[in-house]
Amino acid sequence: MRRTETTPATPVLPAIPVEGEPRRRFRPRSARPAPPVLPALSGAAETPPSPYRARALPGWHGVHRAHSGYADKALWYLPLTLTADALAAALPPAALLHRAGQPHAAAAGAAAAAAWLAVRACRRRYTAAELGERSGVTAVVADWLVLLGVLAVLLLAADEQVGAAQALAGVAAAPLVAVATRTAAHRHLVAARRCAHAVRRVLVVGEPAAADDVVGHLAARTDHAYVVVGVVPVGGARVASGAPVTTRLGPVAPSGPAEDAGIVLGAVREHRAELVLVLPGPRLSADRLRRLSWALHDALVPLAVAPGLVDVGVGRMQLDAPAGLALLHIAPPARSGAPVAVKAALDRAGAALGLLLLAPLFAVLAAAVRCSSRGPVFHRQTRHGRAGAPFTMWKFRTMVADAESRRAELEQAGGNEHDGLMFKMRRDPRITAVGRVLRRCSLDELPQLLNVLRGEMSLVGPRPPLPDEVARYDEVARRRLAVRPGITGLWQVSGRSELSWDETLAIDLRYVDNWSLAGDVDVMARTLRAVVDGRGAY
């Protein structure tokens, strides 16, 4: 969780009278520990430059990208990524060709490294906006496929006799090392942002109610680069978020553009803001916003406009400008068509392959469950799937045989440690010794491959709910049932049982509305780390 700055700054211009009570301190929605707040940068405000001069605001250090620059991030991101990519692409093919007695092994390794670096550079993997920002594998796999095409062309041009298997083995390490360095940089950057480092200082301009909502939304999470350092409200209503308010815009658009521009640019100088985030509303009309954007752009101050949408994937948005009116088209979530058919085919193929390869492990785990406690090897439980259709879900039994009958007793005794509809206990007395190990490693979920093979579940999706949970769903929660439940999902890789009900629901709805095949691949890759880490598994 990230907090906004709460140290009052020196007023830039006389403030408009505020309606209501004095400002209260913003209390974030999450209960997680907050990092140190950013140091307040206040001082005597200088007269802002003319909004029609195309020069930077004095004393202001801006950036034009959507994320922080190299100076804001750790210096080792770029050299580590370049070095790791070059070595991973050069050494394995050179070693393989040298062992096979092929000539020009060193030159081939150098060519592979140059091709790999060129592919990733052309796809902007080394830019300031990209380094450390993401940890997924789909982008790396896409780069690697392009590399294979480039190397195939180079081999044909050089008339080199290299087998396909040998070529693939030579460059197989490149994507693995790229994913490792990408993940290391991302985890370091996320940790830095928890301490309010490598962030962008944002000045919010908009009506107080909308500003409070945006400030609270940004402060509740730390996996992004934006931290609010001040608010310029439109009108005299009270700002309840606790963010510094040095001045205000009038409720009515001024006759000339210089007044709004002077107020906002003065606040930018006062707070050393790196981005102005504008929230359109009835008092901040299109024409007023347009004139303000002229002043900000002429002063080289980056501008962003919040459309008021949350949890909508970038891939579902498309810009259009009919008659000069900016429109943001939102595509519906994928519910049918080719992506759904491909997902179902991959699910069943992956489940069949998994059951075949994991058959020996199934036998070992079944014997361990059978010998550790009395009762059946498998636990069958009714769950609800897509559109609320009930089905029987299979798991390795991790509890005593009469666990279901003892649940009501534990609930009456206040044993439920979860704040929502799910029943969770960190030290559930019904779990057996072997069952605790199975849960810690998520091995008890493996029999659900049978449900995937039968089309009742998916490899990736929301957690399948129990009937009593579904009976208490409201209209929002029932949207979880719009897709097939999954063995793993965003819920599992984001903390599992440590998440509150509201967090679990928000994560599931984000997946339901924005799922994609590439996203599913990323979730499955992150599942391995979540299983090894074991956080929230109980």
Image (tube, helix red, strand yellow):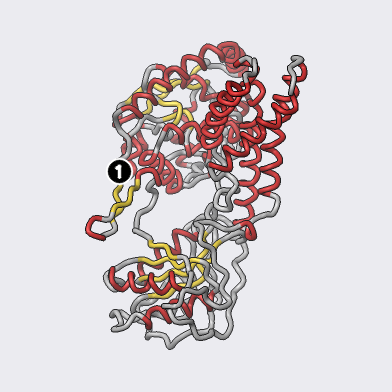
Badge 1 local density, few (<14 within 10 Å), some, or many (20+)?
few
Residue 465 visible to an observer of this rendering: yes
Q: Is residue 364 above or below residue 314?
A: above
Against 383, is 66 above or below? Answer: below
Going 57% across and 70% down the picture, which residue do you hit?
Answer: 61
Across the whole image, how many numbered discs are drawn on residues?
Answer: 1
Q: Amino acid at mark 1?
A: Ala
Looking at the picture, tell me which residue is in the foreground, 507 or 524.
524
Q: Is residue 538 visible?
A: no
Residue in the picture at 53% in, 29% down: 145
Which residue is at 55% across, 78% downward? 58
Circle 1 residue: 331
Q: Quadrant of the C terminus?
A: top right
Q: Secondary structure at mark 1?
A: loop
Picture residue at 58% right of the left edge, 50% below the top? 127
* Relative image position of residue 444 (x, y in whole percent): 54, 24
x and y percentages locating residue 141 in the rendered image: 54, 32
Farthest left residue in view: 323
Left or right, 225 with respect to 458, comes to right
- Which quadrant, please, contains the N terminus? bottom right
With respect to residue 219, does 186 lie above or below?
above
Snapshot quadrant of residue 464 = top left
Query: x, y percentage for residue 42?
Result: 58, 79
Q: Is residue 474 left or right of residue 133?
A: left
Which quadrant of the figure has residue 43? Answer: bottom right
Foreground residue among 124 and 359: 124
Which percent across, then down, holds residue 50? Answer: 44, 82
